[in-house]
Amino acid sequence: MMLARAIHFDESDMNVFHSPARTGEWCISGGFEFSNWSEGDLTGKARQAFSNGWLGAETFGRVTFVAVTKVEPVEYETIKQALAQHFVQMYGAPSLEAAGQVAQDELNHMVELCNDQDPNTLLTVARELTDSGVKESFRMIESQDAGLDQFAIHGSLDEDGHSH
């Protein structure tokens, strides 16, 4: 089973996110955090987290790039428990059991994204607000293409052409 860990190529995530994820921590998409957001919420660092941030499952910070890697069943369970606890503490989930199902769904979504990828494939996420809610899209960057010079080709720019 594959999941993804936070990876940093430079210090930019330290500057663009309120709370950056720690290098190496397991990550999920984390789009649920934005389910009640509107355009008015999308300013500054919050906008960057919304637009391009994966959610770290330990620090609950954000990261721009994650790398696909194998996850052991015991690690998977630890991540699931941490997420469930987060959903109870931060989002008022009624119980750890109820939150555990949501955590399972979030992790399953990430496993589906990662399972068909080769180890060390980089993933990016892009989100936009639509009339029907938050739309997420994902980009895979194969490890042999993942030199820093390649990011300009694959694009890490937002819609108006600015790097953040």
Image (cartoon, grey):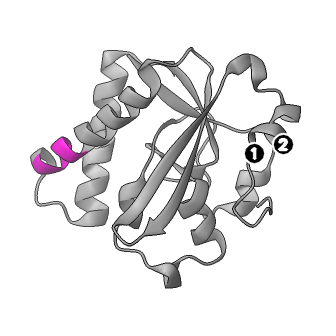
Q: Toward the viewer: 129 or 59?
A: 129
Three-letter code, disc 2 = Ala
Q: Where on the picture, by quarter, is residue 158?
A: bottom right
Q: Give percent across and percent down for residue 128.
A: 51, 63
Q: Is residue 85 left or right of residue 118?
A: left
Task: Choose between 101 and 128: the one closer to the eye.
Answer: 128
Identify which residue, 59 or 129, lies in the foreground.
129
**Can you say which quadrant of the picture contains the C terminus?**
bottom right
Q: Amino acid at mark 1?
A: Gly
> Would you name the residue on which mark 1 appears?
155
Q: Which residue is mark 2?
A: 152
The image quarter containing residue 148 is top right
> Residue at 71% of width from left, 62% of height from top?
16
Judged by its main secondary structure, the magenta piece is helix
Circle 1 — which element?
Answer: loop
Residue found farthest to the bottom = 40
Q: Quadrant of residue 152?
A: top right
CB-based contact (under 8 Å), mark 2 and mark 1: yes
Q: How many labels, in total? A: 2
Q: Which residues are magenta?
A: 98-102
